[in-house]
Image (cartoon, grey):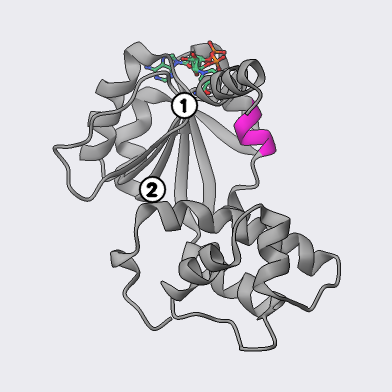
Amino acid sequence: MSKDNSKISISVIKRLPRYYRFLGELKANGIERISSNSLAQMMNLTASQIRQDLNCFGGFGHQGYGYNVAVLHSKIGAILGVDSKLKTILIGAGHLGNAIARHLDFEKKGCVLEAIFDIDENLMGKNICSIPIYNVAYLQEYCEKNKPVVAVLCIPKEAAQSLADSLVSAGIRAFWNFSHYDLNTDYQENVVVENVHLGDSLLTLTYRANNEI
Ligand code: NAI
């Protein structure tokens, strides 16, 4: 990597997981190299957009050869931090929390889900895929001892902001937030938030279905 990643625009960063996914599929299918034109066609982008995106990190392509799939896949993985093993906790072991804990391959995305917390006494002592569920009252103490950095929030929106505030003081600096509430962490410079609203994506689809675009 020849350039400072902190200066890369967030819109380029947001496209990288998609490159990573497509290249992973090509690699799994035994494809060794690909031109920017073919990759662009597959991904419904332009070749110049791909070159521009990858140039932010120093290129990786070779004139007349294109891209080596395995090399590009591993370089983009390294930029994204797929081997980061960020200590992760999940709050809210309800329907959504269960689905996420069971079906998301955290380790392949640079995170290790180590503990789950809930307010419901009936869930204490249980686990989801061997990950223990603890009482949310134990959260601060757990964070002091284990120093997680990522929190996945699957709790009702009413509880989201105050819980996030206490998690920030306990050292959490990244939120994957599914509660239907856009967290405000402006007060803390080094805290990052990804608010995820599946409903927004569905509404976009509704618009596109109605307008045929
Ligand atoms: P659920 O009711 O099945 O689970 C919520 C869990 O959070 C329960 O186990 C409850 O005991 C726990 N909880 C409540 N307050 C808590 C607190 N202060 N600390 C720790 N745990 C607490 O609900 P479900 O279906 O799992 O949904 C969870 C949230 O995610 C809801 O607010 C829902 O609206 C939202 N949601 C968001 C989606 C998205 O795309 N962002 C999609 C689906 C649901």
- Identify which amino acid the numbered label 1 is placed on: Phe
* Residue drawn at the location 17% of the way across and 48% of the way down: 189
Left or right position of 129 against 97 = right
* Residue 150, above or below 52: above
* Residue drawn at the location 77% of the way across and 69% of the way down: 27
Q: Mark 2 = which residue?
A: 148
Residue nearer the viewer, 99 or 180:
180
- Identify which amino acid the numbered label 2 is placed on: Pro
Magenta highlight: main SS: helix
* Residue drawn at the location 43% of the way across and 58% of the way down: 12
- Would residue 126 be visible to someone looking at this image? no
Question: Dividing the picture into quarters, in which one does residue 31 lie?
Answer: bottom right
| Residues drawn in magenta | 99-103
* Residue 211, above or below 18: above
Residue nearer the viewer, 112 or 53:
53
* Residue drawn at the location 47% of the way across and 26% of the way down: 178
Closer to the eye: label 2 or 1: 1
How far, Cα to Cα, is label 2 from label 1? 18 Å
User: If the image is split into quadrants, where does the N terminus sit?
Assistant: bottom left
* Residue 113, above or below 197: below
Q: Mark 1 = which residue?
A: 178
SS state under label 2: loop
